[in-house]
Image (tube, helix red, strand yellow):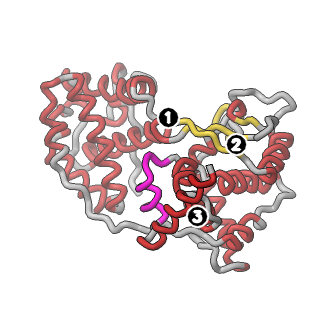
Amino acid sequence: MKKVHNEAYKLAQYIYNWIQVYSPSIQSNSSHTIKVYTITLSLFVGFLEKAKKLDPSSLRFACFSREYIEDWILWLKGKRNCSPETCNIRLAALRAFLKYLAEKDLSHLSLYQNSTLIPRQKVTKKKVMGMSKSAMKTLMSTPDVSTRTGQRDLSILVVLYSTAARIDEILSLKIKQLHLDTAKPYITVIGKRNKIRTLYLLPKAIAHLKKYLKEFHSVTPNPEAYVFYSRNKGILEKTTPEGINKQLKRYAHIAHQINNEVPVDLHAHQIRHAKASHWLEDGMNIVQISFLLGHANLQTTMVYLDITTEQETRALATLEDENQKNITKKWKSQANTLAAFLGVKEIVDK
């Protein structure tokens, strides 16, 4: 192996500390955000190795220059067929690393500053399509509850719809966050920026959850166990959003044959959107909906629900009515590939 330059060792250390120490502990980023960071760096390293023919001996801080990053974005679009939205997510994650790098060593500030000058890809805003109440009813009738998978999936569907929570918020639920035997049963979810919300449950959702817990957890469940845990890794590992969305699409194809209002490309966020829309239809005031969704401000909720000026007037009228009521340190090892040297996952060509 060729002699590795000190810059390469420093870069490897920075990457390790950013992913393994700084992001999870100092910044308290979610597991999802850390996963995005990890994949992004893996893709960038894969680009340096495959497109730029670099190895640990030729790695320098200059490899994170604006020119390299712009070439990387073109590589993502051309070689990996990444959408503009995905490219923007990758760029934002790489900028986050360069910002960390600049904070640790001001001599690298220009790398971060130049990365902020790279324009985002133009995207067409996609409207989130919700579902009617009849479509939701059809969807919930689809899981085969005679199987364990069907029981679990129906329970997830019921909790998703009854709370309008984000899929990761529900899959991150632990037993200790369930409060089902109080006068007003509720769950606590941890949302974006670690904000905690209290979401009350109706009797139907409580019944489904209790039945699920009896079947899938012991009589005295571990408070640290995930409610919807990984079947392969056990109760202390949560199941993945990707796995649940795959199941949802399977159910959607079946339900679509019965009710064509069920979209065949269904994903969990559409259930959240559907519930929010149904709350609005039922006359719930917009501030309550905004709080339940975990939005930071009211305008976000207005945009999220694609509310028109006329609908906004009616929505705010409901508010007036309410008021009136009262990784191993791989950089220390001898590694032949750039990915192995930096301790990131090696990207396999599609």
Frontmost residue, 97 versus 300 = 300
Circle 1 packing at 10 Å, graded few (<14), some (14-19), many (20+), is few
Q: Residue at position x 12%, y 25% from top?
A: 107
Q: Is the magenta stretch mostly helix, strand or loop?
A: helix
Circle 3 packing at 10 Å, graded few (<14), some (14-19), many (20+), is some
**Picture disc at residue 194:** 1
Disc 1/disc 3 C-alpha distance (Å): 26 Å
Secondary structure state at the residue bearing disc 1: helix
Name the image quarter holding residue 5.
Answer: top left
Magenta includes 220? no
Above or below: residue 83 compared with residue 258: above
| Residues at marks 3 and 2 touching, judged by CB atoms closer than 8 Å | no
Name the image quarter holding residue 337.
Answer: top left
The amino acid type found where label 1 is placed reads: Asn
Q: Mark 2 points at which residue?
A: 228
Mark 1 and mark 2 lie on one chain; the one further toward the N terminus is 1
Q: Where is residue 121 in the image (x, y as percent from the top left)?
A: 26, 60
Q: Residue at position x 34%, y 23% from top?
A: 331
Secondary structure state at the residue bearing disc 2: loop
Q: Which residue lies furthest to the front in this view?
A: 324
Q: Mark 3 points at which residue?
A: 280
- Look at the image and tell me whether residue 221 can be seen: yes
- The quadrant of the picture occupied by the C terminus is bottom left
Left or right side of 225 for 144: right
Q: Position of residue 243 (x, y in %)?
A: 61, 52
Q: Where is residue 149 in the image (x, y as percent from the top left)?
A: 77, 53
- The quadrant of the picture occupied by the N terminus is top left
Mark 1 and mark 3 lie on one chain; the one further toward the N terminus is 1
Magenta segment boundaries in residue numbering: 295-305
Disc 1/disc 2 C-alpha distance (Å): 20 Å
